[in-house]
Image: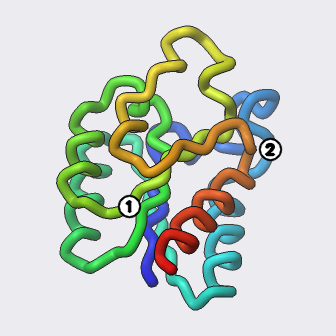
């Protein structure tokens, strides 16, 4: 099984950016944690992070051609307005789980909306970095 782990804008600053909200774990450690957990089931994880909407869309298109079985995506701020990323996820028809470290529904009003949510099989929020592991388990369970 192959899973894509996609992180959007500013997530490269995890561990530094607002640690009271996002914690002190950096993105590199989250990627290692997900890969370690995935390896237990023989699953490979390809990680990708970009601050650029178009690069995320291009990556989603590329993984379709490479027969990926699932996507874990933390779209960052793109969650709230990127119809283009939403459409890319819908177009490739790969089971996708949306992840947020914080609980976006308990934050500022503008963060409560996700335009991505309805094209994903579920949304995981407010679990910190462990939400990524939960997302992996959701995809693995669906593959059985």
Q: Is residue 92 above or below residue 76?
A: below
Q: Is residue 66 left or right of residue 11?
A: left
Q: CA distance from mark 2 to mark 1?
A: 29 Å
Front one among 55 and 107: 107
Q: Which mark is drawn over residue 24? A: 2
* The quadrant where residue 38 appears: bottom right
Residue placed farthest to the top in the image?
109
Please state the total of marks drawn on the protein image: 2
Q: Residue 63's x, y, as percent?
A: 28, 70
Question: What kind of element bears circle 1?
Answer: loop
Which label is found at residue 36?
none
In contact (CB < 8 Å): disc 2 and disc 1: no
Q: What residue is drawn where x is 71% and y is 36%?
A: 126
Left or right, 128 with reference to 113: right
Q: Residues within 10 Å of mark 2 (few under 14, many from 20)?
A: some
Seen at 72% across and 28% down, the residue is 18
**Secondary element at image label 2:** loop
Label ID, residue 95: 1
**Residue 61 drawn at (x, y percent):** 21, 61
Q: How is the image coloured?
A: rainbow
User: Horizontally, is 16 left or right of 31 in the view?
Assistant: right
Mark 1 is surrounded, within 10 Å at the Cα level, by few (under 14), some (14 to 19) or many (20 or more) other residues, namely: many
Q: Residue at horizontal 54%, vertical 43%?
A: 123
Which dot, 2 or 1, sits closer to the camera? 1
The N terminus - image quarter: bottom left
Give above or below for 42 relative to 97: below
Percent position of residue 58, x then y:
22, 56
Front-lying residue, 39 or 29: 39
The residue at 68%/19% (across/down) is 106
Specify the farthest residue to the bottom: 42
Q: Earlier in the sequence, mark 2 or mark 1?
A: 2
Residue 10 percent location from the top left of the image: 52, 37
């Amino acid at each position: 099984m192959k899973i894509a782990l996609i992180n959007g804008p500013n997530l490269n600053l995890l561990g530094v950016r607002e640690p009271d909200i996002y914690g002190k774990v950096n993105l590199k450690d989250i990627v290692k944690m997900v890969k370690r957990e995935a390896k237990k089931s023989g699953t490979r994880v390809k990680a990708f992070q970009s601050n650029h909407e178009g690069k995320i869309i291009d990556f989603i298109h590329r993984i379709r051609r490479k027969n990926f079985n699932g996507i874990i995506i933390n779209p960052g701020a793109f969650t709230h307005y990127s119809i283009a990323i939403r459409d890319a996820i819908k177009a490739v028809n790969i089971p996708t789980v949306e992840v947020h470290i914080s609980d976006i529904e308990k934050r500022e009003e503008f963060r409560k909306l996700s335009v991505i949510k309805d094209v994903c099989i579920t949304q995981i929020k407010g679990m910190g970095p462990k939400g990524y592991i939960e997302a992996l388990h959701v995809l693995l369970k669906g593959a059985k």
